[in-house]
């Protein structure tokens, strides 16, 4: 394969899939650790501990344990400072909306068989970067700018059925929305063309500036969530949820190749499916005001993030080489006062990118691993409460060597990425 076909498979791969603009959060890979301020305060450990209407997204069976009809709306500010080779990304503040509604006709958390309907719309995954510096790549590499903006949102419509005092089951079809924009700028020096002795003579791109730009394209997809919650006794509950693969339409761009380095056609197509997940939660209540939950989650990234087929560009696929991810979350909530509930949590997941593949993920730095969270809910009135959460993802540094040959023309010999994240979330809930 020529240099022109190879070089871009590294840089563009992750940027196409994993940048995110208005839908971002503290992340396990590219999934956020929680939806809404209450689940964020628990570090995402809520599979067996329903918090609010966002349960329809987390485990639809849990919504059958909510005692009332309720409406939740909120948002978060996500701040992920990061550096590549010492250069800061220009985009560091993102805003995320969230909303959910649960309808409980019975108006109680009781064992009488009944169905609770739920609908929720939440941003669910991703990050984005705006690397832009004339010295972005080490050793005078070609890459001078890498920008991506991907939004992924899900809407679940379904509910949970309370079989009896101990068991509920749930199912929710899911509609997914994606929108993606990206740009890569390259400056190719006059090297191989003027040096017949170069091993890349006659295969180097033309000297000068090259821009690969894809304006915003959108796609829709479908999937489903299914789960159960089982109450063993007054102290112990378990929850299990299966989230299917999200099957997406192809993203399509009408393009003008012009001076592009990698765009070879007037139409570029790519499908970005989202991975299936399985999660198990155990909720323990040692004393009445205290709940502790431990969750483990498996995310099947390798199925959708190993190689992604593409048409209309010089590479037949973009190779991410992501591994599957195991997520471990521990959360606790304590009712300190009749009107005040405190929350705290810890979330850990090894990043899915090997050091040797870091250069292929420079615009998708999904490398943070450890999160600590804190939150609370304050009941302002009988039917109205407000919740807040703070999440800190501790800084993670990762360095990877770039293999000798073609890729070093673009990246230099080594890529280093540093990143930490802070998230502040707020939510209001109204009980009917």
Image (cartoon, rainbow, N blue to C red):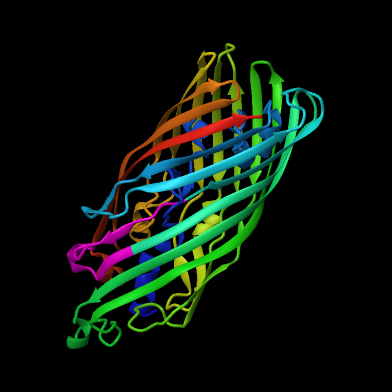
Q: Quadrant of the C terminus?
A: top right
Magenta stretch holds residue 135: yes
Q: Is residue 25 left or right of residue 304?
A: left
Q: Residue at x 56, y 14 (%)?
A: 289
Q: Is residue 321 visible?
A: no
Tally the numbered discs.
Answer: 0
Closer to the camera, 187 or 60? 60
Residue, far front: 381
Give how far across and how far down residue 327 sits, in percent: 50, 39
Q: Is residue 128 visible?
A: yes
Q: Is residue 166 above or below residue 211?
A: above
Q: Residue at x 34, y 72 (%)?
A: 7
Q: Residue at x 64, y 20 (%)?
A: 236
Q: Is residue 143 left or right of residue 360?
A: left
Magenta stretch holds residue 67: no
Closer to the camera, 384 or 415? 384
Q: Quadrant of the N terminus?
A: bottom left
Give how far across and how far down residue 428 sits, in percent: 52, 33
Q: Residue at x 23, y 64 (%)?
A: 412
Q: Is residue 256 above or below residue 224?
A: below
Give how far across and how far down residue 197 sits, in percent: 19, 85
Give how far across and how far down residue 204 sits, in percent: 28, 82
Task: Tell me where the magenta segment starts and ends, as one range.
Answer: 126-146
Residue, far right: 113
């Amino acid at each position: 394969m020529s240099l022109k076909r190879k070089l871009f498979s590294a840089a563009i791969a992750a940027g196409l899939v994993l940048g995110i603009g208005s839908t971002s959060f503290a992340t396990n890979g590219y999934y956020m650790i929680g939806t809404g301020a209450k689940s964020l305060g628990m570090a995402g450990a809520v599979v067996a501990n329903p918090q609010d209407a966002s349960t329809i997204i987390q485990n639809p069976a849990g919504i059958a344990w909510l005692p009332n009809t309720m409406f939740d709306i909120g948002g978060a500010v996500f701040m992920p400072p990061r550096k590549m080779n010492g250069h800061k990304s220009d985009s560091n503040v993102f805003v995320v909306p969230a909303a959910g509604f649960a309808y409980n006709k019975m108006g109680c958390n009781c064992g009488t068989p009944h169905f609770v309907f739920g609908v929720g719309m939440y941003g669910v995954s991703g990050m984005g970067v705006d690397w832009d510096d004339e010295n972005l790549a080490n050793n005078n590499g070609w890459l001078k700018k890498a920008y991506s903006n991907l939004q992924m949102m899900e809407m679940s419509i379904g509910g949970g059925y309370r079989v009896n005092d101990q068991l509920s089951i749930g199912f929710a079809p899911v509609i997914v929305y994606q929108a993606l924009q990206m740009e890569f700028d390259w400056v190719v020096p006059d090297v191989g063309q003027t040096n017949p002795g170069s091993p890349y003579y006659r295969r180097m791109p033309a000297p000068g500036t090259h821009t690969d730009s894809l304006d915003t394209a959108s796609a829709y997809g479908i999937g489903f969530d299914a789960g159960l919650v089982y109450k063993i006794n007054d102290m112990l509950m378990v929850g299990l949820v299966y989230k299917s693969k999200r099957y997406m339409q192809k993203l399509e761009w009408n393009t003008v190749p012009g001076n592009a380095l990698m765009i070879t056609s007037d139409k570029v197509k790519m499908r970005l499916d989202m991975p299936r997940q399985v999660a198990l939660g155990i909720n323990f209540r040692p004393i009445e005001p205290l709940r502790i939950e431990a969750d483990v989650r498996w995310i099947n990234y390798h199925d959708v993030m190993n190689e992604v087929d593409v048409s209309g560009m010089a590479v037949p696929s973009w190779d991410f080489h992501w591994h599957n991810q195991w997520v471990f979350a521990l959360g606790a909530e304590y009712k300190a006062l009749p009107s005040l509930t405190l929350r705290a949590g810890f979330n850990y997941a090894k990043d899915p990118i090997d050091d040797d593949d870091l250069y292929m993920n420079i615009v998708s730095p999904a490398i943070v691993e450890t999160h600590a969270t804190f939150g609370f809910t304050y009941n302002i009135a009988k039917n109205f409460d407000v919740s807040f959460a703070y999440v800190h993802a501790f800084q993670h540094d990762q360095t990877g060597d770039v293999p000798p040959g073609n890729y070093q023309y673009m990246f230099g010999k080594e890529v280093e990425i540093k990143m930490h994240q802070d998230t502040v979330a707020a939510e209001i809930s109204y009980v009917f």
